[in-house]
C-alpha cells in the first residue's frame, strides 16, 4: 500500500514540535508527530518561561491563567564565592514543569487531529521528488514538509550530515525536583567552577533545581553526580545551603550528556529545524523555552503559505532561515558571551562585582537575550 501523504511531519515532541503541530492542525492541515518517549515524562530543563510566551500558550489552548502557576518577577545571581546581585525582571516569567506542560500540549494536539506516534524513533529522512520519506520503526511515512524538533542532539543529525566541530567541549545537564524554603517569585542563578545552577518554583509545591557544567567536572569526580555536587557545586555558599536543606523528590536526577553549543542551521537538506535543533541559547539566559515556541510560530506561518501554494518551497526555506537568523542569531551570540563571563570562576567573581556597581547592565543583558510577546 502507498502510505498516506501528510502535509507536515514533525520529528520531536517537545515545545517546538508540539506547538507547531497544534497550529497546523488548527489551520486544517494533516500532521504526524514522532516522539521517542511516552507522555507524560520528565525532561532536563530549567522550567522557567519568559512572559513573552504567555499569550501564545493561552491562544493554542493551554489554560495558563487557571493553573495556579508561580509568577516570577525577580532574579538573583551569585558568583562562586557567594557575592550576589538581585534585580527585578521587567517582563518576568512563570514556572511550569515539562512533565505537565508537554503532556498538556500533547493532549491538545491529539484533540486537534494530530497523529501522535509515541515511543517511535525516526532513523532516516529522505527528500526526493518534492516530498519526504520518513523511516521510523518498521514503517515508512510520506509528507510534503518535514520539521526537525528533536532538541539538542540526535542521531538524525548524522543522517542529515550535520557535522560537529572537532575537539568541541561537551557539557552535561542535571535536573532535580525538590521541596525547599525559597521565594516563589524569584529565579536564582548560582555559579560554580565551570558551571551554573538555576532554581525556581514550578507547579504544585515543587522547585526545579537544574544545572549545567562541563563533562570534565564529572570525570574529575569519578562520574559520581553526588560527589560532584558535594565537591564543586557546594563550594558556592548558596548552593551549599540549598543542597543541604532541600528535600529531593526523586531517587535520582534527570540527566543529559554530550551537549554542545556548536553552530547549527535553521534549514538542512530541506528540513526546517525548530528550537534547539536549529540553535540553542545558553541555558543561564532563561529563554530557551520561549525561543522554541517562537520558532514554531514563525515556521507555522511559512509552512501554511507553502501548503496553500502562496509561496514555493525555496521561498519557504529562505524566508524561514532569514527570519530565524533575524530573531535568534543575535540572542544566541549574546548568550555565548554571557556564558563565557559566568563560566570561569575568577571572571564570574569579577563580573558580579561589576554588575553590582552598574546594576542597569544586568537589565541590559536580560533584555538582549529576550524578545517581545508574540
Image: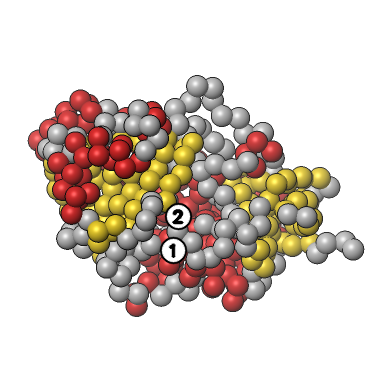
Residue 78 vertical placement versus 295 (above, below): above
Q: Nearer the viewer, residue 3 or 50?
A: 3
Label 2 sits on a secondary structure element that is loop
Cα distance in 3D space between marks 2 and 1: 7 Å
Residue at 54 percent across and 25 percent down: it is 165
* Percent of width and height locating residue 70: 27, 66
Residue 98 vertical placement versus 214 (above, below): below
- Tell how many labels: 2
* Percent of width and height locating residue 246: 22, 56
Please identify the residue farthest to the left as the structure is shown. 357
Quadrant where the N terminus sits is bottom right
From the image, tell me which residue sits under label 2.
43
| Proximity of marks 2 and 1: CB atoms separated by less than 8 Å | yes
Residue at 49 percent across and 32 percent down: it is 262
Q: Is residue 372 visible?
A: no
Crowd band around label 1 with a 10 angstrom C-alpha radius: few (<14), some (14–19), many (20+): some
Residue 92 vertical placement versus 340 (above, below): below
From the image, tell me which residue sits under label 1.
99
Label 1 sits on a secondary structure element that is helix
Quadrant where the C terminus sits is bottom left
Q: Report the side of 269 relative to 90 (left or right).
A: right
Q: Nearer the viewer, residue 244 or 209?
A: 244
Q: Is residue 13 visible?
A: yes
Amino acid at each position: 500500500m502507498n502510505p498516506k501523504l501528510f502535509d507536515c511531519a514533525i520529528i520531536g515532541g517537545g515545545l517546538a514540535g508540539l506547538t507547531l503541530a497544534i497550529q497546523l492542525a488548527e489551520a486544517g492541515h494533516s500532521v504526524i508527530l514522532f516522539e521517542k518517549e511516552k507522555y507524560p515524562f520528565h525532561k532536563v530543563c530549567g522550567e522557567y518561561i519568559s512572559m513573552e510566551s504567555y499569550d501564545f500558550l493561552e491562544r493554542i489552548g493551554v489554560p495558563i491563567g487557571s493553573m495556579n502557576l508561580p509568577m516570577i518577577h525577580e532574579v538573583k545571581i551569585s558568583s562562586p564565592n557567594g557575592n550576589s546581585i538581585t534585580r527585578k525582571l521587567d517582563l518576568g516569567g512563570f514556572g511550569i514543569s515539562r512533565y505537565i506542560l508537554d503532556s498538556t500540549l500533547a493532549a491538545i494536539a491529539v484533540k486537534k487531529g494530530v497523529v501522535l506516534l509515541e515511543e517511535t524513533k525516526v532513523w532516516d529522512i529522505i527528500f526526493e521528488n518534492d516530498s519526504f520519506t520518513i523511516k521510523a520503526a518498521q514503517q515508512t511515512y510520506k509528507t510534503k514538509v518535514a520539521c526537525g524538533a528533536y532538541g539538542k542532539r540526535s542521531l538524525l543529525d548524522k543522517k542529515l550530515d550535520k557535522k560537529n566541530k572537532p575537539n568541541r567541549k561537551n557539557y552535561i545537564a542535571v535536573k532535580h525536583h525538590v521541596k525547599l524554603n525559597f521565594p516563589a517569585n524569584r529565579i536564582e542563578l548560582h555559579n560554580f567552577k565551570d558551571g551554573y545552577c538555576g532554581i525556581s518554583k514550578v507547579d504544585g509545591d515543587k522547585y526545579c533545581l537544574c544545572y549545567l557544567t562541563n563533562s570534565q567536572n564529572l570525570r574529575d569526580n569519578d562520574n559520581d553526580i553526588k560527589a560532584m555536587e558535594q565537591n564543586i557545586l557546594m563550594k558556592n555558599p548558596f548552593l551549599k545551603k540549598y543542597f543541604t536543606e532541600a528535600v529531593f523528590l526523586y531517587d535520582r536526577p534527570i540527566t543529559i550528556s554530550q551537549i554542545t553549543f556548536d553552530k547549527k542551521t535553521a534549514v538542512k537538506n530541506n528540513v526546517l529545524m525548530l528550537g534547539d535543533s536549529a540553535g540553542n541559547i545558553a541555558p543561564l539566559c532563561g529563554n530557551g523555552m520561549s525561543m522554541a515556541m517562537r520558532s514554531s510560530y514563525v515556521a507555522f506561518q511559512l509552512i501554511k503559505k507553502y501548503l496553500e501554494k502562496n509561496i514555493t518551497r525555496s521561498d519557504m526555506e529562505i524566508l524561514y532561515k532569514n527570519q530565524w537568523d533575524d530573531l535568534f542569531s543575535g540572542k544566541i551570540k549574546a548568550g555565548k558571551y554571557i556564558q563565557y563571563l559566568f563560566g570561569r570562576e575568577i571572571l564570574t567573581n569579577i563580573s558580579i562585582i561589576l554588575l553590582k556597581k552598574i546594576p542597569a547592565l544586568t537589565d541590559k543583558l536580560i533584555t538582549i537575550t529576550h524578545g517581545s510577546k508574540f
